[in-house]
Amino acid sequence: MKVAIVKQVLDVCGPWTSIRWRDTTPENIFTVWPGKAQFWELTCLFKADWFVISQQQTTDYTRWAVLNHPGHEAVLRGYSRDVIEPEEIPFSDYDLVITVDAILNVPSGGKPLFAYYASEHMDRHYVESRQGPLRNYDLFLDHMMEAPRDLKSLPQAISFPYLRDPDTVRSVFGRERQDAIWVDWRTLATLTLADFDDKWSDTTDAAARRLEEILRYTIRFSGELFRGTYGVNDPPLWGHPRRYLEAVSKCKYYLAAGRISGGGQGLADAASLGCICIGQKDKVYHRMICHPDCLSDGLIGMPKMVRDILNSTDKHQEILAWQDQALQDAFVWGPIGILEKAIRWKRETFATPNQTPVDLLQGIVAGGGKTPHPKQIVAPIVSRSSSVNERK
């Protein structure tokens, strides 16, 4: 499956330059990637090319992350490289195009499949997309997992997490493990009653030290990226995701219980790295990944649960095996199956150039029955028998 990922120039996520996979590596791409590692594993899993395009539309996310903060737009425009126009992208070379927000005017028919994530679940575009994809896209990928989980037709909104690539992650990181707990920055923000987009402060550092006293265990954390709102700093923190993942990979445990906001993507990073993950029941990614003994109801019961896990070394391998299976099922094979199914449906719909989609489908269902909509062909999900590498 050949994949392209497209974002706008005023999007803080991902690399800040257009870059082909053939010209980089899982490690080297961090040199042009100054923000969160959010799409890094997806990039590695598909060996995807990235295209940074000129600004096509202003979303709530664009305002919250960039336009509402003096100087942010200048930073993004000043440090971004190889920004192109959408029409310069060779879309026909790809099986799948994933964009960050619905930023393209998608043409009808044929190759490729067009899908998009919404950057922020509080954005109006996210809310609207829950009812169905915008701008003629085939799929809206709902990272908060609130949309239907089964693919029934095209176009459709579907529950779809940020994908993971544990094999690549562990080939790059995790060569040593120490008796320490990495604490999610949002957990520390919760302890200080801060909003999720507040800048890192000395108060947050003090909360981490207090938590270390309560748990009686070594705590590690970082607020480097969040000294700039939405992770925008001048100059950008090139390579920050690599430094962050390297630091987390050295810790045996990852603690995200008690955190505010979001679906819990940071815990998925830690699970890919091979940390024992401790989360909370009201976060969707935590429920999808964590062993039942590692899910907290909130801050009140969290310290005792953490100490129980620290003292139950005989269960650690069971916990890690649970997490690894969850990653493969819910963050690798399941989503890949959905995408391949959707790609096949779309190709079958427009497979015969001399026939309209309706003519083609009438041939498929000849012999009786109601002719389905051109984008509602049903096909079986692919087998899990082939390896991830065979899919790249």
Image: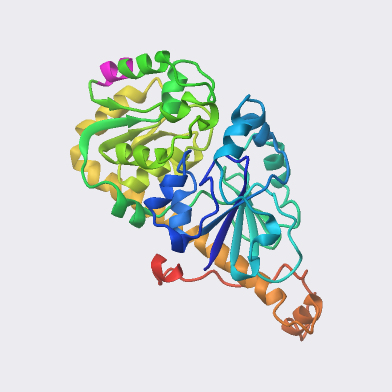
Residue 337 percent location from the top left of the image: 52, 64
Range covered by the magenta-colored residues: 210-215
Q: In the rendered image, which quarter is residue 144 located in? A: top right
User: Is 213 covered by the magenta stretch?
Assistant: yes
Residue 90 percent location from the top left of the image: 63, 66
From what the image shows, is residue 221 above or below residue 352?
A: above
Task: Tell me what residue is drawn at x 67 percent, y 76 percent.
Answer: 348
Task: Tell me what residue is drawn at x 53 percent, y 34 percent.
Answer: 262
Residue 274 percent location from the top left of the image: 30, 46
Q: In the rendered image, which quarter is residue 300 located in? A: top left
Residue 208 percent location from the top left of the image: 34, 19
Q: Give the colour scheme shown.
A: rainbow
Question: As rendered, which of 228 and 336 lies closer to the eye?
Answer: 228
Q: In the rendered image, which quarter is residue 256 located in? A: top left
User: Is 50 covered by the magenta stretch?
Assistant: no
Task: Tell me what residue is drawn at x 32 percent, y 23 percent.
Answer: 303
Does residue 11 appear anywhere in the picture?
yes
Question: As rendered, which of 201 and 153 lies closer to the eye?
Answer: 201
Asked if residue 291 lies left or right of residue 54, the reply is left
Dominant secondary structure of the magenta stretch?
helix
Quarter holding the C terminus is: bottom left
From what the image shows, is residue 180 above or below residue 270?
A: above
Question: As rendered, which of 291 and 82 lies closer to the eye?
Answer: 82
